[in-house]
Image: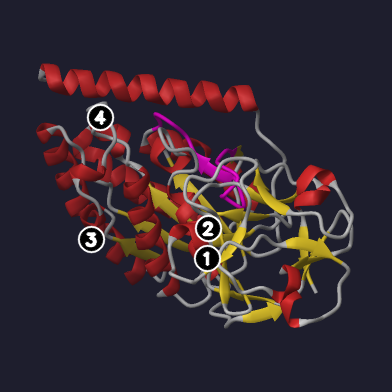
């Protein structure tokens, strides 16, 4: 192995250990559930989100929510940012195919997924672990998954590129076997689907030669989302159109309100007694939230305490929002949540952006 390859392998081991320690320190939280279609993100540190907490799961969750799909991520592990509405997953840093295979039966029995997203094999390559039989191990893992969960749709990804030339060649050899493995399962009547993840990224999308950057993870999210939408039932039905309603604060029972029905750029919403008038009606379309023809907007460079505002719609990330399962509304660009300032409940209290806590002054219901 070259010095460069050894450095990359050492970096991978260190990153995996760091991620594992961080997860242990935070603990495995009780599962989140919104009653939606149960989807298990399954794999190694790339699923867990080493370097970028939440990994591809954040972008995938946001796309699913914007598309009107009600999905419940499942798994025995838990991590990710507030912009990720469901933190459950089955990503294990540093793990190879055989290690996933040794534990998968219990995980499937515990979480009962309807759909499985599998990206595995990177650590087999990094550890140079019996590479000639890696495709066979993947095939056996798929047999075990489909035996325990025969009704589940299993999406199998080719592994993403690696910066080290020798390891990338090994990854390509491994990936070349995956389409045939998937087809053999399909021929046997199993619900297995191929996702070409390798071609979705380039080495420019890697932060350390192994793990994706935030942009790279978002490309993975897009590839998963496209694949899921191509298989009816794998994520339920979605595609709901724009919906209009009031947004009611859980703390006060008052409504998110555009003061004086102003349509000026920069006007800051407040809470006010609910009236049903147009300045309290908010239209959710995809990830935008609009009132009076203007978009809810997080100012560029927003930090905790920044105002939220209405602005001319332009479709930027700072005008995209997640309506999370816990009732919070979080900004895609900043990760901060809509917050009634100072936990106040009086008419006229301004609404700001603040670190997400899911306290009552950050929870909203549509009515």
| Cα distance between the residues tagged 1 and 2 | 5 Å
Which secondary structure lies at badge 2? helix
Which secondary structure lies at badge 1? helix
Discs 4, 3 touching: Cβ within 8 Å: no
Discs 1, 2 touching: Cβ within 8 Å: yes
The structure residue drawn at horizontal position 35% and vertical position 61%, both measured from the top left corner, is 223
| Cα distance between the residues tagged 4 and 2 | 29 Å
The structure residue drawn at horizontal position 33% and vertical position 51%, both measured from the top left corner, is 139
Report the residue marked by disc 4: 126
Report the residue marked by disc 3: 180
| Cα distance between the residues tagged 4 and 3 | 23 Å
Q: Is residue 353 above or below residue 192?
A: above
**63 displayed left or right of 6:** right
* Mark in front: 3 vs 1: 1
Report the residue marked by disc 2: 61
Q: Which residues are magenta?
A: 78-95
Discs 4, 2 touching: Cβ within 8 Å: no
């Amino acid at each position: 192995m070259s010095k460069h390859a050894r450095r990359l392998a050492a970096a991978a081991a260190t990153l995996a250990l760091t991620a594992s320690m961080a997860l242990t320190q935070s603990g495995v939280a009780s599962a989140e559930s919104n009653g939606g279609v149960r989807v298990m993100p399954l794999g190694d540190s790339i699923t867990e989100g080493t370097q970028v907490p939440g990994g591809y799961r954040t972008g995938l969750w946001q796309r699913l929510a914007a598309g009107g799909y009600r999905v419940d991520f499942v798994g025995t592990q838990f991590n990710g940012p507030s912009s990720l509405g469901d933190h459950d997953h089955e990503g294990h840093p540093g793990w190879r195919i055989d290690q996933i295979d040794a534990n998968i039966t219990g995980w499937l029995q515990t979480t009962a997924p309807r759909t499985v997203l599998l990206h595995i094999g990177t650590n087999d390559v990094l550890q140079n672990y019996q590479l000639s039989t890696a495709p066979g191990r993947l095939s056996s893992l798929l047999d075990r998954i489909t035996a325990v969960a025969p009704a589940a749709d299993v999406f199998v990804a080719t592994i993403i590129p690696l910066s080290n030339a020798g390891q990338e060649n090994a990854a390509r050899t491994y990936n070349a076997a995956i389409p045939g493995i998937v087809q053999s399962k399909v021929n046997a009547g199993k619900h297995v689907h191929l996702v070409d993840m390798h071609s979705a990224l380039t080495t420019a999308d890697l932060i350390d030669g192994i793990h994706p950057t935030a942009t790279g993870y978002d490309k993975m999210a897009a590839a998963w989302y496209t694949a899921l939408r191509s298989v009816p039932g794998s994520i339920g039905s979605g595609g709901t159109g724009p919906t209009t309603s009031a947004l009611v604060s859980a703390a006060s029972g008052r409504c998110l309100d555009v003061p004086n029905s102003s349509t000026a750029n920069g006007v800051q919403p407040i809470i006010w007694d609910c009236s049903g008038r147009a300045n309290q009606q908010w239209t959710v379309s995809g990830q935008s939230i609009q009132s009076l023809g203007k978009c809810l907007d997080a100012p560029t460079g927003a930090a905790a305490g920044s105002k939220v505002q209405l602005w001319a719609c332009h479709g930027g990330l700072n005008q995209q929002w997640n309506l999370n399962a816990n009732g919070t509304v979080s900004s895609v660009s900043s990760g901060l949540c809509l917050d009634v300032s100072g936990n106040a409940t009086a008419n006229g209290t301004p609404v700001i952006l603040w670190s997400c806590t899911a306290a009552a002054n950050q929870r909203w219901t549509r009515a």
